[in-house]
Amino acid sequence: MSSQFGEDLVTDGLIFCVDANNKKSYLGSGTVVDDLVGTSTGTVSNATFDTAGYFDFDGSGDKISFTAPTNTPTGDEARTLSCWLQMGHATNRMMVFGYGAGSAYRTFSLEISSYGSTDKGIALMAWDVIWESTTLLTIDTWHYCTIAYAGNTVNSGTLKLYIDGQDAGLNRSYGSDNVTLNTPAENFKAGERPTGSDLDFTGYLSAVHLYNRQLTAEEVEHNFNAQRDIYGV
C-alpha cells in the first residue's frame, strides 16, 4: 500500500485518486489538481481551497474538470467510485463527481439525491435511471460515500451503495431495472453535471477514488477506517 495515496488505501484496481489533503495532488494554490495514480489533471474553476484540506463548492458554477484517467471503466464494466465529502445546506439534487455522456445510461455519477423526497442520501445517476441509498447523510458532517458496481446490468444484485463503510441500502427512485450502461471515458467533473452546468454541489469535497473493479464490502470499510481520523469521524 503506497503512502502517496493516503493512509493504507486499497490500491488493487485504483486508477484515479485526487486528494486535497496531499500536496502531491494539490499544492494549496493555483488551478491544477494532479491524479496521484496516473496522468490525469484537473482544472479548478471557482471552487475555493481551504487549508484544512478540501475544496469548497458554493453551489453556483464551482467545478473541477479532469482529463480522462488511464484505464477508465467504460461501457458496462465494473467500477467503484468513492468520495470524501461534506454536504452543505441545499434543497435540490447535487452532483458530486461523475463522467460520461448526456444520453440514456451513458453517465456514471455520484450525486446527493432527494428524488421525490426532502431527505438526502447518495445515489448513482446514470441518466434515465437513479438508484438512491436508504441511509441518509448528515449536513455539515464528513462522510465517505461509495458506489460499487459489478457490471453486467444495473440492479440490486450488481450495485451497492455505502456511507462511511457501511451498506447504505438501495432504492430505485427513477427509471428501469436491469439497464445496461454504456459509459464513455469523457467529461470527468466534480461539482456539477458532467455534461452540463446544473445540479451544482454545495459543500466540501476532499478526495475522489475511482477503481476499475467492484470493491468488496470489507475493502470499502477498510478505506473508510484508513482515513476517518483525518476527517474526525
Image: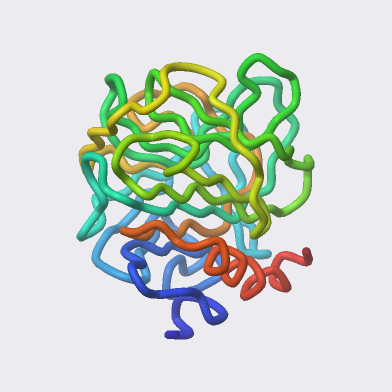
Q: Is residue 185 above or below residue 70?
A: above
Q: Quadrant of the N terminus?
A: bottom left
**x and y, in percent, of residue 105 in the image:** 31, 26
Q: Is residue 102 above or below residue 45?
A: above
**x and y, in percent, of residue 192 in the image:** 46, 32
Q: Residue extending furthest front? A: 157
Viewer-side residue, 68 vs 12 = 12
Q: Quadrant of the C terminus?
A: bottom right
Give the quarter of the image for residue 106. Answer: top left
In screen coordinates, is 9 left or right of 59?
A: left
**x and y, in percent, of residue 17 in the image:** 41, 64
Give the quarter of the image for residue 195. Answer: top left
Viewer-side residue, 88 vs 146 = 146
In screen coordinates, is 93 left or right of 156?
A: right
Give the quarter of the image for residue 206. Answer: bottom right
Count of all numbered marks drawn on residues in the image: 0
Q: Is residue 8 above or below residue 72?
A: below
Q: Residue extending furthest bottom? A: 2
Viewer-side residue, 61 vs 178 = 178
Colour treatment of the image: rainbow
Q: Is residue 57 above or below residue 145?
A: above
Q: Residue at x 43, y 58 (%)?
A: 30
Q: Residue at x 49, y 47 (%)?
A: 147
**x and y, in percent, of residue 35 in the image:** 35, 64
Q: Residue at x 59, y 72 (%)?
A: 222
In screen coordinates, is 140 left or right of 204?
A: right
Q: Residue at x 65, y 50 (%)?
A: 163
